[in-house]
Image (spheres, grey):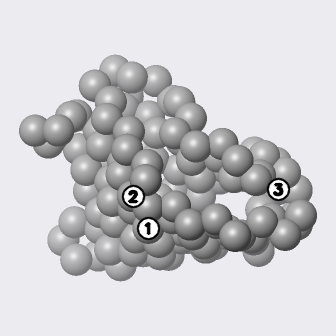
Amino acid sequence: MILDRSDTGTALHDVLNENGLRIQADCIGNVASARSTADNGIVNVSGVAAGNIAFNNNDPDFDVNDFVSLVPPAVTGGGTLSFASAAGAVETFTYQVAFGTAQGDCVLSGTLLTS
């Protein structure tokens, strides 16, 4: 389980960092993203944002410091991230991102499966 609750003004920070994948949150710009820490990974993010707007971000050559957004900036939504590292690790993150809630100004929560 992953749960990150941040107050407005909280700068970019790591929520998870393992197997070549870094999940980050930023409550200044209201952004949640995934960033690579190793070369030659593969990543796909798909989900639905507020207003029932579907989104999809992918990178078949996910190299160091490449990133994909988990939701459009400052928009509540949820989805699934699938990541495969060149070293053979596979991560699947099912998540939701919400802003301005009773639980916190910026909330990123979900379930991570690693194999």
User: Disc 1 marks which residue?
Assistant: 94
Any mark on residue 64, and which? none
How many numbered markers are drawn?
3
Q: CA distance from mark 1 to mark 3?
A: 22 Å
Q: Residue at x 31, y 35 (%)?
A: 5
Residue 12: % across, % down? 51, 30
Amino acid beneath label 2: Gly
Amino acid beneath label 1: Thr
User: Disc 3 marks which residue?
Assistant: 63
Q: CA distance from mark 2 to mark 1?
A: 5 Å
Q: Dot 3 lies on which element?
A: loop
Q: Are marks 2 and 1 in contact (CB under 8 Å)?
A: yes
Q: Residue 7 versus residue 30: which sits nearer the camera? A: 7
Q: Is residue 100 left or right of residue 17?
A: left
Q: Residue at x 43, y 53 (%)?
A: 1
Q: Residue at x 38, y 39 (%)?
A: 4
- Residue 76 visible in this rendered orientation of the protein: yes
Residue 67: % across, % down? 65, 53
The crowd level at tag 3 (other Cα within 10 Å; few <14, some 14-19, many 20+) is: some
Q: Dot 1 lies on which element?
A: strand
Any mark on residue 110, and which? 2
Which quadrant: the C terminus? bottom right
Q: Is residue 79 left or right of residue 89?
A: left
- Is residue 88 placed above or below 64 in the rendered structure? below
Residue 60: % across, % down? 76, 74
